[in-house]
Image (cartoon, rainbow, N blue to C red):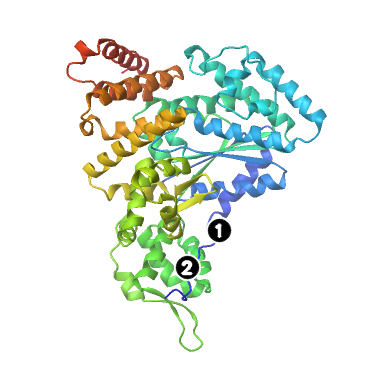
Amino acid sequence: DNHMPQLMISDKLYGRDEEMLKIQEAYKLRSTGVCLGVIITGEASVGKSRLARSIDELSWQNNGTVLRGKFDQVQESQPLSVIANMFNDMCQLFAEAVRSQGMKQNLASALESALGSQARLLSRFLPNLPRLMTLNFTQNSSSYCSESTQVIRRLFCKTLQVLSFYSPGPITILLDDVQWADPASLLLISSLLQSSKDNKSVFFFFCIRDNDCQHSPDSTVNSWYQSIFEMPLKHITLANLSEDGVNAMVSDTLCLFPRLTRPLSRVLHRKALGNPFFVWQTLKVLQKEGYLYHSLRGTMRRWMWDMDKISDLRISENVLFLLMSEMNKLPSDMRMGLEVASCIGAAVSMTVLGILSSHLKVDLAGILERVAEKGFMDRVGTEKYRFVHDRVQQEAYKTMAEHRRSEHHTTFGLAIYSQACSDNDDDLLRISLNQINRAGPGTITDLRQKAMIAALNLKVGRRSAALKDFGHSLSYFENGKSFLDVGSWEHQYKLSIDLHDAAADAACALGA
């Protein structure tokens, strides 16, 4: 019944009072130079990102600014792109906020003094930088020169130092899902931390799924994870909610006194292991199945539940079958929209949606808007749709048979590649290549297409290697080799030798 009350979860934090106090203490210590920031670690879905949002109020109270970045497990973007986008947003904020002509001139002079003739190199990453200073376009710099990787990190550090000096309040740099950051970004994070040790106007906030870092096959991630604890950061380990925390959440959601919801909360805590994300998912499914319902009988207009059926309900250890159950009940066009989005990654931009909508002849943005209303995705401004959690994206991806995933990746990759070439868009080019690589050479029969993809892997791999991102560069080179035809040494000798040489160099750099 559309007129029946629906469950609405509060934006309030539950059971995190102790952690909140630690964050507030760390933020106060920032002004003394004792603490550079906070690092929150914990398992998936435990609420790290939600806790991190509490920094907004602290920043607002101190007239500060919060810059956000979130890394993606699929890593469709170029190395450094997450941090570069944050800094680019910061340049835009300053360009719009600084009104005084004198202040603008002082800021421009400070940036010109700090960055010098290499500012143009940085502008390749920060398109909004010219809004703050005049660039010397006689300098012919390449953002992919291998000798410039350390220079690029130094330029980012200098930019942060200057902008934080002119900022009316502290600048908070919030990076989420750092366990999926590319090696070049990890090196930049370390450089930013080192250069900000004496800067009392910068505060760092990291969310890390530590289990993925500790068991990462990439030694760069492992070594970075160990080194980060040597920095003056407040470490907060986030566990699942206690029974009291779950009860506070359920009590607010159902608008009932805690003593009334305690029996239900006790069962939910046991079945969802205190994981806040899965507690909420479980509540939604219980309502959908009729085990949790709103009674309109007599004067008892309140939420009720069938405790016997809920207690007997078989729920797997991680409650993921609830997501699968809900997805399978969606209309076919919405399931298709979830499939398409899950192939792209944790988030899908409006640009990519437009390309795939034209190719598939459907309104993907409209479909994902309905998916968002069901709670599986969020709309982020006017730019993109994002899965509410990476677990949702993973489960949507698993609903497809392997051959269907490969077909989607190839089809989507080629469609995006065509547009990338037309627009000369490097970001789209990388997205298209990653899609095709995930499908593998078995889905493409045209030999000219295979050679084109092999050459593209060589090009993008070299760019990654130039940024010292040897893990991804080796992956691109190996993918490129896989697309070579059996007769490539006769018909495409230079491409073949270049790919094999590049792969060997990257493997040596990794110590493989």
Left or right, 229 with reference to 453:
right
Q: Position of residue 472 (x, y in %)?
A: 37, 25
* Quadrant, the N terminus: bottom left
| Residue 446: quarter of image | top left
Q: Residue at x 34, y 46 (%)?
A: 360
Left or right, 240 with reference to 106:
left
How dense is the environment of label 2, judged by Cα within 10 Å: few (below 14), some, or many (20 and up)?
some
Left or right, 489 with reference to 41:
left
Q: Is residue 259 above or below residue 182?
A: below
Say which residue label 2 marks: 7
Toward the viewer: 96 or 452?
A: 452
Q: Residue at x 43, y 32 (%)?
A: 428
Q: Specify the label residue 11 is tagged with.
A: 1
Toward the viewer: 337 or 111?
A: 337
Q: Identify the secondary structure beneath mark 1.
A: loop
Q: Position of residue 67 (x, y in %)?
A: 60, 39
Q: Position of residue 502 (x, y in %)?
A: 33, 14
Q: Position of residue 308 (x, y in %)?
A: 32, 75
Q: Residue 476: in sight, yes or no?
A: yes
Q: Is residue 54 above or below residue 286?
A: above
* Quadrant, the C terminus: top left
Q: Residue at x 38, y 35 (%)?
A: 416
Q: CA distance from mark 1 to mark 2?
A: 13 Å
